[in-house]
Amino acid sequence: MTESTSTHGIAPDTTPGGEDTVLIAYDGSAQSRAAIEYAARFLSTKKAYILTVWEPIHRQAARASGMSGMMQHDWNTEANSATHDDPAYAEAVSICTDGVDFARQNGFETEPFLVESATAIWSAIVDAAEELQVDLIVTGTRALSGWKSILQASVSDSIIKHAGRPVLIVPPLGEGD
């Protein structure tokens, strides 16, 4: 992986005759829960990695203040990137655990896979899929339309363009679905 670093997970068995494996991107949203439900309903394979991508709190703060990419002389990135003290890491672990539990309730044999991202979320998802050698990526989407879709790059669109493997996108579902 180039710009993201995996912190949990074990690479799957890639020997001939191995089981098909899916990577399900999970951020705790209703869309990501729907992605798990649809994958469980329609896929024959039940082996899945639940992926949660997280960004360290110091990077979030720098990006929010418009300082991303600028040198910070008094910013100790080594101390600030300690995962065990980072509230963003703790939240990501909680979200990933929730996703694993939800996937197991839906019949999947799952393992957590937590990835720290230094770039775009889609890139971390594609890198994780490559590292784990999964057969399919499953993700939800916010389904932006109109001007929002023109102005904002879609994570799911970028995954489709760069994944090099099949991708199942589950759009937001209506009340009756």
Image (spheres, helix red, strand yellow):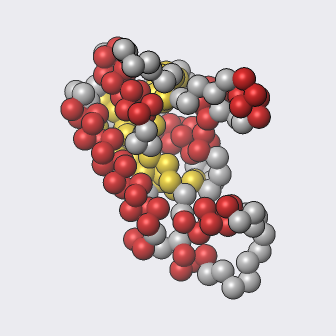
From the image, which quarter does the C terminus lie in? Answer: top left
Residue 68: x and y, percent? 73, 63
Hey, which residue is sitting farthest bottom in the picture?
A: 74
**On the picture, is 123 further left or further right than 86?**
right
Q: Position of residue 74 (x, y in %)?
A: 69, 85
Q: What residue lies at 75% left-to-right and 28% top-to-bottom? A: 147
* Horizontal side of residue 30 vs 64, given as left or right: left
Residue 111 visible, this angle: no
Can see residue 13? yes
Please determine whether, in this image, residue 24 is positioned above or below residue 119: above
Above or below, 53 against 133 in this view is below
> What residue is rendered at 36% in x and 55% in y?
93
Residue at 50 percent across and 37 percent down: it is: 129
Residue 33 in which image quadrant: top left
User: Front-most of 42 and 8?
Assistant: 42
- Name the residue at 53% across, 71% down: 81
In percent of width and height, residue 4 lies at 57, 53
Q: Position of residue 107 (x, y in %)?
A: 22, 27
| Quadrant of residue 118 within the rendered picture | bottom right
In the displayed structure, 121 sits above or below 153; it is below
